[in-house]
Image (cartoon, grey):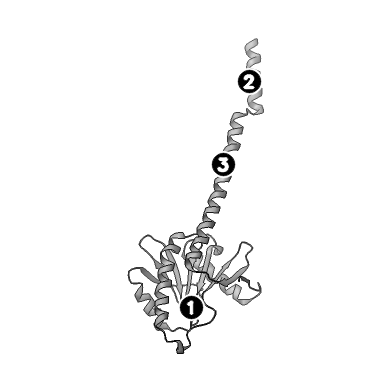
Amino acid sequence: MAKTVNQKDWRKQNFLSKCQSAAAELNTASYQDIESLKFRDSTGSQDYRELINELGNLKVAEIQGDYQGKAWKVTDTNGNSIILVEHETGLEILYIVGSVASLVSLVPMVMNIWSRMRDRWLPHQGRFSPGGLERRHFDKKDQLIEEPAPPVEVIMLQHLLNQYNRLNERISSLETEVSGLKSRIDSPTQSVIKKRAFQQGRAKK
């Protein structure tokens, strides 16, 4: 169930700073375009080194910013990028909400590698939290929303449907603009009518 965080909570300010850093790094217009997927595990630096090594066929660069942890930018051969953040409490993935290509390729790849690594961890090491995967983002009213994350396939479908809806809204807006332009073209303005009347008056003389 989605939970709206107390907007005076320190977590909102921390997450805002993180999203602003990610928006600048991923070259998107607003921090509201950034979404976070967070695993809840007890991890160490060696786990992240292993993860980075597993991503050897991708471009991985350590980056600076207010991420509240060590961060890397991961980029594929098509220029799609996401950000990975190291936390003692588990891996965090930051990505652009509208970047379907990143959601289709990079996010599932990282999640699959991390899940494979987790399968090798012994349960008695106390690494797992009952909270599971968490999704966080800012909504249109600038409220910080935290909710259990559905399977990545569902997340992809949700964002694809949102893209489709926005495209439909844009098409409707363009159709309205075209219709208005056509009406103005088909209906002569007052100045055109006066000019025609003036020309007709001169012709009669």
The amino acid marked with disc number 1 is Gly
Quarter-of-image position of residue 54: bottom left
- Nearer-N-terminus badge (2/1): 1
Query: Would you place residue 192 above or below residue 162 in this image?
Result: above
Q: Residues within 10 Å of mark 3 (few under 14, many from 20)?
A: few
Nearest-to-viewer mark from 3 and 2: 3
The quarter of the picture where the N terminus appears is bottom right
* Mark pair 3, 2: CA separation: 31 Å
Q: Provide the residue designation for mark 3.
A: 175
The image quarter in which residue 76 lies:
bottom left
Depicted 171 relative to depicted 25: above or below? above
SS category of the residue bearing label 3: helix
Q: Categorize mark 2 by other alpha carbons within 10 Å: few (<14), some (14-19), many (20+).
A: few
Residue at point 57%, 45% (across, down): 172
Q: CA distance from mark 2 to mark 1?
A: 73 Å
Q: What whole-number distance in Å separates the C-alpha atoms at marks 3 and 1?
A: 47 Å
Q: Residue furthest left?
A: 57
Q: Residue at label 1?
A: 69
> Which of marks 1 and 3 precedes in the sequence?
1
Residue that carries the numbered disc 2 in the rendered image: 196
